[in-house]
Amino acid sequence: MALTAIILWQRGEKPVMITAEKAAIRDITQRVTATGRVRPEVEVKISPEVAGEIVELPEKVGQTVKKGDLLVKIKPDNYLARVKQAEAALSAAEADSLQRKAQMLNDQLDERRAQSLFEKRLISDAEFKAAQTKSQVSAASYQASLHNIDVSRSSLDQAR
């Protein structure tokens, strides 16, 4: 190395200065600045069960969330209106069912009276069959009203 320095000195070129250090184990930090786009490994689409105006986004973009975290707060006007509407439909179905039950009980009583009169030969076969048919129809109507109550309850549960 000394020989190289002498030769370079004789040529008139300035020697290059170098820095030397003892070898040691240590961390090397390297920083890189780049332009690009960060994309998630998994993209999850979310959609609310009810429609409405978004009034709050409590989580920030890029923030880690876990199951159960509130992601979006929706203005409850539409939701509450649907719940009220479903409650009203359930009340109407229950009232209709009570009315049909009363009609069924009345028609069953008429059928029993008609049977008694038919056995005494005080009414015709056609009148007795008409009373039976009316009783059967009102019983079926009452059963249908019970199913309507179930449907209304399901709609209310879904609205909630």
Image (spheres, helix red, strand yellow):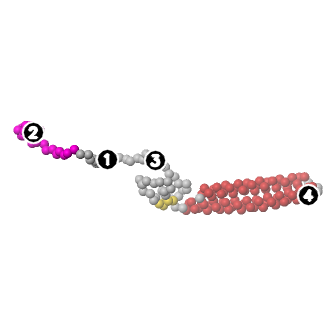
Query: Label 2: which residue?
Result: 2
**Between disc 2 and disc 3, whose residue precedes?**
2
- Which residue occupies 26% across, 47% down? 26
- For badge 2, the amino acid type reads Ala
Q: Are marks 1 and 3 in contact (CB under 8 Å)?
A: no
- For badge 1, the amino acid type reads Ala
**Between disc 3 and disc 4, whose residue precedes?**
3
Specify few, some or many for label 2: CA neighbours under 10 Å numbering under 14, 14-19, or 20 or more.
Answer: few
Give the alpha-carbon distance from disc 1 to disc 2, as whole Å.
44 Å
Element type where label 3 sits in the image: loop
Element type where label 2 sits in the image: helix
| Relative height, residue 67 to residue 11 (above, below) | below
Query: Percent from the top left, x then y, of residue 11?
Result: 6, 38
Of circles 2 and 3, the one toward us is: 2
Segment tinted magenta in the rendering: 1-23
Give the alpha-carbon distance from disc 1 to disc 4, as whole Å.
99 Å
Specify few, some or many for label 3: CA neighbours under 10 Å numbering under 14, 14-19, or 20 or more.
Answer: few
**Between disc 1 and disc 3, whose residue precedes?**
1
- For badge 3, the amino acid type reads Glu
**Between disc 2 and disc 4, whose residue precedes?**
2
Q: Which mark is residue 117?
A: 4
- For badge 4, the amino acid type reads Leu
Q: Nearer the viewer, residue 97 or 130?
A: 97
| Relative height, residue 26 to residue 93 (above, below) | above
Q: Nearer the viewer, residue 44 or 77?
A: 44
Query: Label 1: which residue?
Result: 34
Query: Label 3: which residue?
Result: 43
Give the alpha-carbon distance from disc 2 to disc 4, as whole Å.
139 Å
